[in-house]
Image: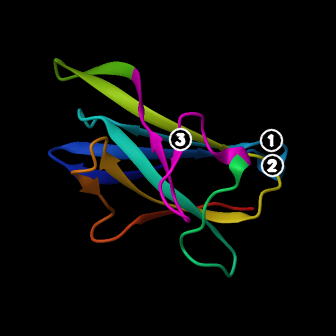
Amino acid sequence: MQSFGLGNKTELLVAVRQPEGQKGPTNITLITDQPAGMVLHWGVKKQGKGEWLAPPKDIIPKGSEQASDIAYDTPFEASDSIEVQGDKLQLQKAVIEIPAGHDLTGLTFVCKSKDGTMWWKDGTCHAFLVMQA
């Protein structure tokens, strides 16, 4: 799992589940406690190619929209709520499922507010999540 700070004491947690031996799909789940509606702005990376490539059509989640030639926008959806020190936090999540045998080496992404006025990056640039083929 990997964690990214979003500011205002909120975070983005990324969990990658890859079965051993690639006998099943790789599941990437992004979860946040950010209260504002969020969108995952993302692309993929392949060995020897640029950092942002449009994802293959078969891994694009329902409800996603093409943002450019190299990226898609996938809205986060309401998920479970949790209680932390007496405060109830509503979680949001986005899930990407990648079939076994893929040739992707990573997922490149930033998050943005639904209205596009706020952008959350990994420091000063996009976040990169390494995947094993």
Q: Distance between the residues labelled 3 and 2?
A: 21 Å
Which residue is denoted by mark 2 in the rendering?
Answer: 100
Q: How is the image coloured?
A: rainbow
Which residue is denoted by mark 3 in the rendering?
Answer: 64
Q: Nearer the viewer, residue 20 or 108?
A: 108
Residue 105 screen position, x and y as percent: 66, 66
Q: What element carries label 3?
A: loop
Q: What element carries label 2?
A: loop
Q: In this view, does 96 lie to the left or right of 120?
A: right
Q: In this view, does 119 lie to the left or right of 21?
A: left
Which residue is denoted by mark 1 in the rendering?
Answer: 24
Q: Are marks 2 and 1 in contact (CB under 8 Å)?
A: yes
Q: What residue type is labelled 3?
A: Ser
Q: Which of 56 and 18 is in front in this view?
A: 56
Around disc 1, counting alpha carbons within 10 Å, would you say few (fewer than 14), some (14 to 19), or many (20 or more)? Answer: some
At a point 69% along the width and 63% down the height, the residue shown is 104
